[in-house]
Amino acid sequence: MTRTHLCTFAIRRRVFERIGAFREYFETAEDRDFQLRMGEACRVGYQPVDSYMYRLHGTSITHSRSNERRHFFDEMAVAFQKERQATGSDALMRGEPPVPPAHDAKKASTTVGMHLHHMLVGQSWRDLREGRARHAVAGSWRALWAHPFYLSGWVNFMKILSRAVFPKS
């Protein structure tokens, strides 16, 4: 499982020479596939520092491709990893990749506002768990303004607010 963006990695050239670069099959999730292959080939370290800014915009692959295709490629990255671990190769390496679902331009992925909403809600819950109740409430409020008509946003805001005001002992 990957929980970070590839932009946060400092990668030695010999890693690319060992595992290759991004695989063209992946329309999306090519970074996830790369990270999974990299994790199989070498040690990966972690330093908890901010290393880049993530820019959200409506024309990115994340926001211009259908969720169905994005999920398909995410699932393929993980399925290929399981295949490699079991057999030493995957369907893509053997030249037998599954056919992706058809691209439907009308079924755009999540909007930038929704993406921002989910990021802010996630950070709010992390803030709450780490004892930063004020930050948690402020972040969940900002999430509401990113996508104000999303019922789940209001539910999260009320839960975070109640737990901030009445913490569990």
Image (cartoon, rainbow, N blue to C red):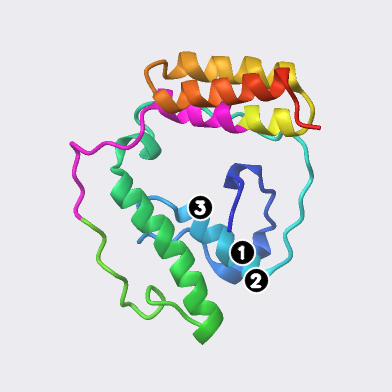
Contact between marks 1 and 2 (CB within 8 A): the answer is yes
Looking at the image, is 169 positioned above or below residue 80?
above
Q: Is residue 24 magenta?
A: no
Give coordinates of residue 26: x percent, y percent.
38, 57
Looking at the image, is 4 positioned above or below residue 64?
below
Which segment is the magenta one? 102-122
Residue at image mark 2: 41
Which of marks 1 and 3 precedes in the sequence? 3
Looking at the rendered structure, the kind of residue marked 2 is Ala
Give the alpha-carbon distance from disc 3 to disc 2, as whole Å: 15 Å
Apparent side of residue 47 relative to residue 30 in the rendered image (left or right): right
Looking at the rendered structure, the kind of residue marked 1 is Met
The residue at 37%/81% (across/down) is 94
Contact between marks 3 and 1 (CB within 8 A): the answer is no
Give coordinates of residue 12: x percent, y percent.
69, 57
Give the alpha-carbon distance from disc 3 to disc 1, as whole Å: 10 Å
Q: Is residue 113 magenta?
A: yes
Looking at the rendered structure, the kind of residue marked 3 is Asp
Apparent side of residue 15 relative to residue 22 in the rendered image (left or right): right
Give coordinates of residue 22: x percent, y percent.
47, 58
Which of marks 2 and 3 precedes in the sequence? 3
Q: Secondary structure at mark 1?
A: helix
Looking at the image, is 57 positioned above or below residue 2?
above
Give coordinates of residue 4: x percent, y percent.
61, 46
Give the alpha-carbon distance from disc 1 to disc 2, as whole Å: 5 Å
User: In which quadrant will I find the N terminus?
Assistant: bottom right
Q: Secondary structure at mark 2?
A: helix
Apparent side of residue 70 relative to residue 127 in the rendered image (left or right): left
Circle 3 packing at 10 Å, graded few (<14), some (14-19), many (20+), is: many
Residue at image mark 1: 38
Residue at image mark 3: 31
